[in-house]
Amino acid sequence: MTLEVGILGYRFMGKAHANALARLPMFFPEAPDVERSVLIGRDESALADAADRLGFDSTATDWEAVVDDVDVFYNLGPNHLHAEPAIAALEAGTPVFCEKPLAPTLEDATRMADAAADADVPAGCAFNYRFVPAIRYAKRLLEAGELGEIRQVRGRYLQDWLVDPDAPWSWRNDAELAGSGALGDLGSHTVDLLRFLVGSDELAGEIERVSGHLQTFVDERPLENSDETRAVTVDDAYSAQLAFENGAMGTLEGTRFATGHKNDHSIEIHGSKGSLRFSLERLNELEVLRADDRGYQTILVTDEDDPYVDHWWPPGHVLGWEHTFVHENYEFLSAVADGDSFEPSFADGLAAQRVLSAVEESDDRGEWITLE
Amino acid sequence: MTLEVGILGYRFMGKAHANALARLPMFFPEAPDVERSVLIGRDESALADAADRLGFDSTATDWEAVVDDVDVFYNLGPNHLHAEPAIAALEAGTPVFCEKPLAPTLEDATRMADAAADADVPAGCAFNYRFVPAIRYAKRLLEAGELGEIRQVRGRYLQDWLVDPDAPWSWRNDAELAGSGALGDLGSHTVDLLRFLVGSDELAGEIERVSGHLQTFVDERPLENSDETRAVTVDDAYSAQLAFENGAMGTLEGTRFATGHKNDHSIEIHGSKGSLRFSLERLNELEVLRADDRGYQTILVTDEDDPYVDHWWPPGHVLGWEHTFVHENYEFLSAVADGDSFEPSFADGLAAQRVLSAVEESDDRGEWITLE
Amino acid sequence: MTLEVGILGYRFMGKAHANALARLPMFFPEAPDVERSVLIGRDESALADAADRLGFDSTATDWEAVVDDVDVFYNLGPNHLHAEPAIAALEAGTPVFCEKPLAPTLEDATRMADAAADADVPAGCAFNYRFVPAIRYAKRLLEAGELGEIRQVRGRYLQDWLVDPDAPWSWRNDAELAGSGALGDLGSHTVDLLRFLVGSDELAGEIERVSGHLQTFVDERPLENSDETRAVTVDDAYSAQLAFENGAMGTLEGTRFATGHKNDHSIEIHGSKGSLRFSLERLNELEVLRADDRGYQTILVTDEDDPYVDHWWPPGHVLGWEHTFVHENYEFLSAVADGDSFEPSFADGLAAQRVLSAVEESDDRGEWITLE
Amino acid sequence: MTLEVGILGYRFMGKAHANALARLPMFFPEAPDVERSVLIGRDESALADAADRLGFDSTATDWEAVVDDVDVFYNLGPNHLHAEPAIAALEAGTPVFCEKPLAPTLEDATRMADAAADADVPAGCAFNYRFVPAIRYAKRLLEAGELGEIRQVRGRYLQDWLVDPDAPWSWRNDAELAGSGALGDLGSHTVDLLRFLVGSDELAGEIERVSGHLQTFVDERPLENSDETRAVTVDDAYSAQLAFENGAMGTLEGTRFATGHKNDHSIEIHGSKGSLRFSLERLNELEVLRADDRGYQTILVTDEDDPYVDHWWPPGHVLGWEHTFVHENYEFLSAVADGDSFEPSFADGLAAQRVLSAVEESDDRGEWITLE
């Protein structure tokens, strides 16, 4: 059986997933066969070019016609276009893989998660950083109790592409289209990663209370190729404090104003027996300090028995950012083919959204917010 | 003229300051002459031993007799003993150098700052990290505008000496004696360092609003050499979010539960033109990213024209933690001798205290607190 | 026009190049079209599996039949099989891409370079590390004179897969089959990289004299799945000292016994105006110190205008080891299609071989050897 | 009993040792009492100033009158003044502490070691880096067999104070006065450190054969405050390859031309079970990889039970370069007081000299040199 995949969105994320699909046969031969069947977009000419480049059989400008035709539907469009197509696909019994954040609003995210709960097929939220080998390896350590009780966590996602006040306005600066700024775009990754790593009952449990802080440093930006400016209606940066169910505490940060940092997503965890650190810009490495260690070990997570590594190259032949997409596509499509469940699911996407929404509400009201 | 110095406290801080005084003549010959005159404490035998070792001429068990006899009074005792002797000395016209945090309560700190304001002599709060060469060098860069407008700051002080639940109870775990836990002990350093670096009107300005989070992970601890336990009534860790006067945002953390971290005090600053990072465990280094840089430069701040360095050794011959005390004693005693003012002053100590107190109040009330 | 490629060798290097060819259309659309036409090997069943997995149209067990049939011939077999097929292909006018080291002996390498000189088609030696974006960026800096006169260089390639004396014997431990051990396998990369970076007349010039040191730590190893052992007849590690034409000096090391190092290939260069450092295990980074810098900048070489990066992902989305193969295949195939020359050529392969051969001779004779 | 110490030399090393002597009572109360008795030099006015600053009771311009008057004689003068005063002191039964390298020539060093062998008192060569806590800790690990059989070592000492061709000529550039350049000044430290760490019979054993390379990049330099230049007759940089008694191999480098490196003395060791790394610019840290580790641990060697640390400050309160002098003075003076032997001795100084001399001879003759 070959799975026919329809994909909405052909820019950054479209390319990342198309590449992942193309690489599966050579490196994950046990993955289901996949056909890049339909590429969906609005600008016909750009779409045709992209379909050609990305190896799609056909194109469509209307997602409605596609979502129940294909075997799998990927929604990689802008945030405000996540809900309707995803829900339609799920209602048609088509498995859905949706980019993060799940939706621009908590309401949309809830509707999507409800649709997923009612459907009989996998609905995945594409938090790709769960699929970094070093992160999977960290999870192994955490689940084996190597760090003991979780006391403190720290998550930061630092970028700098808006430092320049003349950097052009885009949909990512607009509350209607994006929902929020750094909070949703970057924070959703960080929240999901922390939930993945320490969110189980045996570790920190879920995030229970949050205090948030949002800030917009540059209030309006020029439109590209235009004399006009448009208002920035989302946050440029956010921070948050977290209280977890089982007593751990944490801090979060996400920003597009960290001068000099390009894509620096880092996680730090302190437990009663050990600590660990990870940074996306050195994604092949994990720093781990365990009970009998006196300092962090800098571990190159490229050994044969490290997660996913046996599919690739010998020890020390490092992987890149894009490999996380191959891994998540492999897992998602395998779940589809085998009728298994898949995580991160829409429920995970919603859970992250709830935290982000509480951060926003906290900033608004100037008080800690308890999640239900 | 030789300044006769009386010092209350002969343990860790007593040793650090006595050493600093002893080293001045060889390395800072322009410093005023100083006599380690009287060492003050309660346990006569331990005191005599310490006076002998630390080079004091005499001892006293009663500070009241000393504070107006000596030319300078150092208060290095536990926090709850800061206020009375310091105020008495100032009222007697004796310059005072007091360890941080200034006091266990905002009330005490206010009384001390008031006494200092009424006095005609320097009253210094011994925030020694202002005197790290790399920190002074950072301040030079900041004041020269090299980082542009300050957008985000981050301060963390990570220790791990209480991770073990059987680590013995001490006065530092008691609210009466210490005021607070990690918050006052570690947080006072971090708040002062950030105020020093970015607190001027031209940069971030003062901290205006805070949200705080305090946590105690281990509720009681064994008394040393005893079967009994005593309650821990202070925080083991704190975090905070900051809003500065001029629009910058920040996060703070201090903890005695960061497994594997011994004395890891770090500061990170992002401005519109550049960024910098500093960590106390590598105190000879400063990481700086400037307008035309593509990555952080790791600068070894040991060149001849770096702050204080010409007093010591050639480039690359690194300094240690204790040198910060030599620098601060040099500056404080020079101010005393010359009748100059000294910073960090009691007013700075109080300013830090106000922030910490607001963090505590915020944690208590579950809402952001605006500093007056 | 579509180039039909025949490839000898289907293990590690076969997979690396097949993957590179497969990825060109999506990321380098301007590359010539390529068909993975014939895969050549001896073990028919393993070969058939590999051809299927790696996307080849057909297989062959006899290279002679293939080398003038295809448009391009890749020789990725063991070192002792490099010369004959490569020479035959060149004599048939077929462009050849050959894995490094060019040959197990200087004689073979010379014959191959002679054949390449007589041929009218590109003959490339696949030193893939020339195609790391950070290395290309380093070359830009060097050629622009940013480091000034080159004074000292350092190259090290550290692996640890033979530390265990029970690690099984392979052809790589045999002088007949491999030529040499760490020297040829690792040293050829290091010598080529240094020649690429500083070998021009304006910089250090060619390597003129060498002193070498070879060592075998474990003299025999078990055959896999057998009670027998076989002699190790190559070096486990080598070191060398270099004198360059223009007065620079250097040191080299390569080893399979650097406990804990997997694939740690590093280069360090000191010039009269600056210095730089690179390590393959962090291949997205380059450390650079320039005239006005006080410390090394850690540069993430993933900006849009960095070499090859515009073909991939946004800044900070790091690449992996395998991307170097995509870049070198792109360059080599473009040269083939356009009738251009390609570097590193067989002449470069021979030049590296001459240095390695002199290192071996120096070790043998206990004296410095001058290269002609 | 108080030891009266006479010291020849009052510049950099004079200050370093005077400071060390001054700090012993407070931090090493069990050290013998010491009086800074006589400071010896030629320039009476500079000498008087230095004696005043460094706390000496008196001065002398003639060492001959001093060496049998004092209880201990320190020779901290330029290299060509090491032999005569040291030998005279030893002949007079006065313990001698001499700065490194022991002498500018092998002949002098041999005479000094002979005199030490004939004397009944300690004769120490002041290789201070043996007294870095992290180095002592490394030695503990090595002696406990934690790294297994030693396979490869690497030592580098990188400085850059001569990169500028206009940096003024000094005695350190003159073969008569200094013996050699980077080789003796820097290389003596590196050779001694490697001998200290791995030189025992159970580990690598002594260095048996060497190949050397010396280079002078700038042939003449201006005299300070003058229009004249003077010839540089020593090496600006050296490298060497080493073969140890028990089969290990090594490389050495020392240079005054490593742009951007101030005092970067680093050691790396690979054994059959583990590896370690140390760099002087981060002298509180040791990187260690042991049998069950997957990466290097970065250990902050400041715990209470780490070598010498209990004399100083709590964990994480880092030491500086100068503390190594306190430790070595403590050990040397204790040996003097107790009639014990002291290492590094003049024999160790001679052993290092033999290696350096062989490196020079190897460079001269273009061949490997076997040490007798």
Image (cartoon, coloured by chain):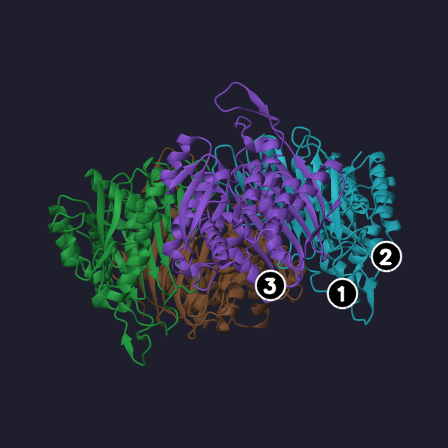
Chain colours: A cyan, B purple, C brown, D green
Q: Residue at x 39, y 56 (%)?
A: B27
Which of these two is toward me, C58 or A304? Answer: A304
| Tag of residue A61 | 2
| Residue sitting at x 45%, y 70% | C273
Quarter of the picture containing the C terminus of chain C is bottom left
Q: Chain of mark 3?
A: B
Image quadrant of residue A124?
top right
* Label 1 environment density (alpha carbons within 10 Å; few <14, some 14–19, many ≥20): some
Q: Secondary structure at mark 3?
A: helix
Q: Is residue D36 above or below residue C74?
A: above
Instruction: Please name the residue that numbered disc 1 is placed on.
Output: A168
- Name the front one of labels 3 and 1: 3
Q: Which mark is residue A113?
A: none
Q: Which mark is residue B143?
A: 3
Answer whether residue C260 is visible to the viewer in this image: no
CA gap between label 2 and label 3 equals 55 Å
Q: Nearer the viewer, mark 2 or mark 3?
A: 3
Which comes sooner in the sequence, label 2 or label 1? 2
Chain at tag 1:
A
| Observer-nearest of D239 and B181 | B181
- Asked if the residues shown at circle 3 and circle 1 are in contact, with their CB atoms under 8 angstroms apart, the answer is no
* Left or right position of D155 against D115: right
Provide the chain ID for the residue under circle 2: A
